[in-house]
Image (cartoon, helix red, strand yellow):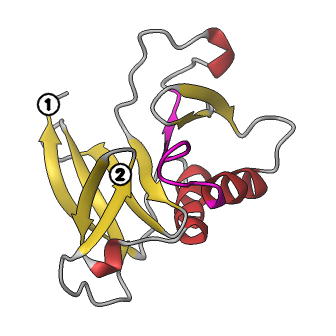
Amino acid sequence: MSGFVLQTNGSSSTAFPHPTDDPDDKLRGAFGRMDGDRLFAFLLWEVPGDRRFDDGLRGVEPLSFIQCAGSADALAVEVREPDAEGGYVLSTLGRADEEAGPQDVEIRWRGSSTTVFRNERWSSDDAADLFLQYWRGGGAVPDNVTKRALESFDR
């Protein structure tokens, strides 16, 4: 595996996991500090092919990823993954073991917001678990979540 990149607030990127960091502690600590303003979003994606983070990733765009936005007590988590037609689909993740309930939970971050179903609101610890499962699974979303398609993309 070539490795993963963890991007913060849509700008700062680092190799994940960093050789000196414990992956669990890194994500749980960072997600727990999310305030919806100064720290509001994370995106995790696998470096394509034989490349490594240290090779430089200028011009490399993530095709598949998991991302979250919001604050530590209310996060929306999304995944973009390949579809059957050779494109990609962006989906919001929810807990499969909970009733969706009404779509009335507003997730806010840095002047933006989205409204999700109740089972699609994640705590920082639960979102960190999803990211860790995604990383450990080589970019696969765990089976215990629902996916609500939001948007499709051509390759």
Label 1 Cα crowd, 10 Å radius (few <14 / some 14-19 / many 20+): few
**Type of amino acid under label 1:** Asp
Q: Earlier in the sequence, mark 2 or mark 1?
A: 2
Residue under the image location 33 percent in, 72 percent down: 120
Pick the residue in front: 34 or 94: 34
Residue 138 is left or right of residue 59, and the answer is right
**Whether residue 107 is situated above or below residue 95 in the rendered picture:** above
- The image position of residue 40, as x and y in percent, is 49, 47
Quote the CA–CA distance across marks 2 and 1: 16 Å
Question: Which residue carries the number 2 mark?
Answer: 79
Tell me the residue that label 1 is attached to.
154
Give the quadrant of the C terminus: top left
Q: In this view, does 95 lie to the left or right of 38?
A: left
**Residue 93 image offset from top left, x and y in percent:** 34, 65
**Quadrant housing the N terminus:** top right
| Residue closer to the observer: 30 or 35 | 35
Q: Which residue is drawn at 38% across and 22% down?
A: 61
Circle 2 or circle 1, nearest the eye: 2
Q: Is mark 1 on a helix, strand or loop?
A: loop
The answer to whether 5 is drawn above or below residue 66 in the figure is: above
Q: Any magenta on residue 36?
A: yes
Q: SS at mark 2? A: strand
